[in-house]
Image: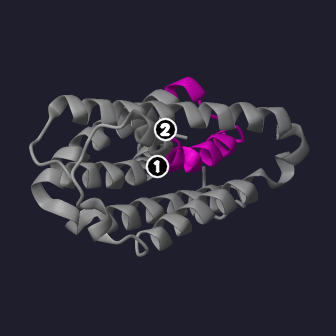
Amino acid sequence: MGFIELLFIAIGLSMDAFAVSVCKGLSMKRMNRSHAFVIALYFGFFQAAMPLIGWLLGKQFQHLITNVDHWIAFGLLAFIGGKMIRDSFDKDPKDFKNGYVLNHKELLVLAVATSIDALAVGITLAFLRVNIYYSIVAIGCTTFLLSFLGVFAGKAFGVRYRSKAEIAGGAILILMGLKILLEHLGIIPF
């Protein structure tokens, strides 16, 4: 897996965190950079930690499922991407318009919830030839940056782009899963 593919996966994974960060920015009366930094730190850390956990789990069971790993990768990425797209239509923008107070328990829950898909991607990465440490740094840094910018975007633009970001993230994950499947089936070259 090359840098561009990894970057697309990182961007796709970070769209949930970006969308939540936009909502956090939307609910701020004044822009608070330290709050934006803390929000981005939570999301970036968990988006990096979950693929590592998934990768460790995947490596433990790799010998059992090597013959179908490309189907598993495709299935997980397509499921996660489809769920992201479906979820983008289920959220009510009015839910995010209450005043914002930095709540670490809430951020922890949100960071874990938005990074569950990264756990599944980590399992997928266990079946591919990737440097997991390089991958988790790329995913964590991308998520941190997009979440930090998301808080500012939320404050500036409101909830208008949240749904589109989640749809784009879901589509990216589905396309990456399809690419992995087609490569392993020999339809497109590695």
**Which of disc 1 and disc 2 is earlier in sequence?**
1
Q: At 33% across and 61% down in the image, what residue appears?
A: 165
Looking at this view, name the residue that lies furthest to the top.
Answer: 133
Residue 47 marker = 2
Q: Magenta segment: does it hold 131?
A: yes
Looking at the rendered structure, the kind of residue marked 1 is Leu
Q: Residues within 10 Å of mark 2 (few under 14, many from 20)?
A: many
In the picture of the structure, the residue carrying the numbered disc 1 is 13
Left or right: 87 as drawn, with respect to 68: left
Question: Can you see residue 21?
Answer: yes
Residue 135 marker = none
Q: What is the x, y in percent for residue 120?
A: 64, 48
Q: Quadrant of residue 163?
A: bottom left
Q: Main secondary structure of the magenta part?
A: helix
- Cα separation, mark 2 vs mark 1, equals 8 Å
- Give the magenta part as a residue range: 112-135
Q: At 21% across and 49% down in the image, what residue appears?
A: 25
115 relative to 49, above or below: below
Label 1: element kind: helix
Quadrant of the frame with the N terminus: top right
Question: Can you see residue 188?
Answer: no
Label 2: element kind: helix
Q: Are marks 2 and 1 in contact (CB under 8 Å)?
A: yes
Looking at the rendered structure, the kind of residue marked 2 is Gln
